[in-house]
Amino acid sequence: MLNFITLYDKNYMSRGIVLYESLKKHCEDFTMYVLAMDDVVESYLTSLGYDNLKIITVADIKEMYPVLVRLEKERTRGEFSWTLSSFSIQYALRKFNLDSCIYVDADTCFYNNPELLLKECVEKSVLITEHNYTPEYDQSATSGKFCVQFMYFKNNSDGNKVLEYWRSKCEEWCYNRMEDGKFGDQKYLDDWESRFEGIVYNCRNIGCGVAPWNIQKYDISVEGGTYFVMERVTKIKKPVIFFHYHALLEIAEKKWVLSQYRLTENDKKLFFEPYIKKLYKIEESYPAGLVEKAYRNPYKAHFKMLRCVFGYLKRFKQFKENRFLWKRNIFSFIED
């Protein structure tokens, strides 16, 4: 059986449920542990009554790690969430005595069985995944070579050694800025292959972690209901294991900013449009008033729009994208 853990608040709850449903479709036997970042998530997930969905509260994890009380006050909400990634994995392994645990970001969606990845690393205790950037978008120097999106840890001496190193580093420093070779919880992973030689497996399967920052390298196809990516240079072809829907933002009723990176119409049609429709389907089942759409609150809407614009400005300056790409992406919305 596979054990997964993720964390999210009410604003990402529909994404977390899509993640769960995608695993239910592709995994025969699994348990999903969710660190509920607020009472809404805890209450709503409890009401669903799924046998293989277990809820952990922030109070639960603070009880095991009292230092989190202080860290929550010192860090932003986003930074605290990044901090909790490593803590949550260790909590699940210890509290539930699991053989292993896989951390997954809430905004990922599976298109095939993740066991295909674990079969590649049977002799290793830890699996990590690269951003696998398209060269023009390479941010390894600032954001890290590896992405905290899918991380596998065995509950043995080697796996626990790596996890404790990461957890202690995130306790020491985990901020949304580049400082002394650190960035958030991610840059710590850069040297794991050498630091923990023989323990850590770098999964280079191109179907693992398809994302807006690397999709430009691939031709996408669907054959018999299975999604495939084929690298345009090497012609290597693999089934898509999961897609990472990073920075997907709804800015008005059924209008979305899909990405800060270059996408094709095929990318939008095959990945983004079906995913957004799944989000809507879940949100339509919410009790009235359960979650307020950010764009309906003028203050939140302005903040989100400014964040989006600044994100594009950063990418525009960093990658020297032309104004036509900027315009196409900033107005690339899905309208049903």
Image: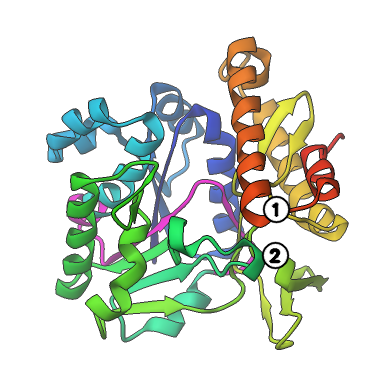
The quarter of the image holding the C terminus is top right
Left or right of 125 in this view: 107: right
Location of residue 47 in the rendering, given as x and y in whole percent from the top left corner: 47, 28
| Segment colored magenta | 92-113
In the rendered image, the vertical position of residue 186 relative to residue 195, given as above or below: above
Residue 304 is drawn in which quadrant?
Answer: top right
Q: Is residue 141 left or right of residue 83?
A: right
User: Which callout, 1 or 2, points to the residue nearer the camera?
Assistant: 1
SS class, disc 2: helix
Q: Is residue 318 visible?
A: yes
How many other residues sit within 10 Å of disc 1, few (<14), some (14-19) or many (≥20)? many
Q: Which mark is residue 261?
A: 1
Residue 297: which numbered mark, if any?
Answer: none
* Quarter residue 270 falls in: bottom right
Of the residues shown, which amino acid type is indicated by label 2?
Ile
User: How many other residues sit within 10 Å of disc 2, few (<14), some (14-19) or many (≥20)?
Assistant: many
Vertical order, 273 against 144 (above or below): above
Point out residue 130 in the picture as x, y percentages from the top left corner: 48, 69
Q: Name the residue: 85% across, 60% down.
A: 266
- Residue 263 lies, with reference to residue 214, above or below; the image says above
Answer whether residue 285 is visible to the viewer in this image: no
Residue 44 in percent (x, y) is at: 48, 27
Mark 1 and mark 2 residues within 8 Å of each other at the beta carbon: yes
Residue of label 2: 215
Residue at 77% across, 39% down: 330
